[in-house]
Image (cartoon, rainbow, N blue to C red):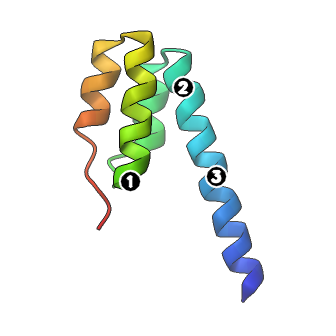
């Protein structure tokens, strides 16, 4: 049972790293594919928006702002 939790946590970390990389590289389509309309936690969303603002990519910022929050 703990192996499943560890694998899920590692997968979540890898997914988050992929999101950050896509934002940093300005890869809007990849970001859309990674997000796939899945909700994310508020803290993660805030961080990703801040990262996108560093690159001043308005389309990515808008895309991230539209992502639903995980409850």
20 on left or right of 33? right
Which residue is label 2 attached to?
Answer: 22
Quarter holding residue 16 = top right
User: Taking 15 as reference, is 26 above or below it?
Assistant: above
User: Taking 61 as reference, is 16 above or below it?
Assistant: below
31 on left or right of 18? left
Compare marks 2 and 3 and give the one earlier in the sequence: 3
The residue sitting at 60% across, 36% down in the picture is 18
Compare marks 3 and 1 and give the one earlier in the sequence: 3
Asked whether the beta carbons under mark 3 and mark 1 sit within 8 Å of each other, the answer is no
Q: State the CA–CA distance, disc 2 to disc 3.
A: 14 Å
The residue sitting at 45% across, 31% down in the picture is 31
Which residue in the rendered view is the most extreme toward the bottom? 1
- For mark 1, give the secondary structure: loop
Q: How crowded is the residue under tag 1: few (<14 C-alpha within 10 Å), some, or many (20+)?
A: some
The residue sitting at 54% across, 25% down in the picture is 22
Q: Is residue 38 visible?
A: no
- Residue 67 in picture, x, y percent from top left: 28, 43
Frontmost of labels 2 and 3 is 3
User: Taking 57 as reference, is 10 above or below it?
Assistant: below
In the image, 65 versus 47, the foreground residue is 47
Q: State the CA–CA distance, disc 3 to disc 1.
A: 12 Å
- Residue 24 in picture, x, y percent from top left: 54, 19
- For mark 3, give the secondary structure: helix
Q: State the CA–CA distance, disc 2 to disc 1.
A: 16 Å
Which residue is label 3 attached to?
Answer: 13
- Residue 55 in picture, x, y percent from top left: 44, 11
Which residue is label 1 attached to?
Answer: 40
The quadrant of the picture occupied by the N terminus is bottom right
Quarter holding residue 32 = top left
């Amino acid at each position: 049972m703990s192996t499943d939790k560890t694998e899920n946590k590692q997968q979540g970390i890898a997914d988050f790293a992929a999101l950050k990389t896509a934002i940093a590289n300005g890869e809007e389509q990849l970001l859309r594919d990674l997000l796939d309309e899945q909700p994310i936690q508020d803290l993660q969303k805030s961080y990703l928006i801040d990262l996108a603002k560093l690159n001043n990519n308005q389309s990515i910022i808008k895309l991230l702002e539209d992502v639903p929050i995980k409850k």
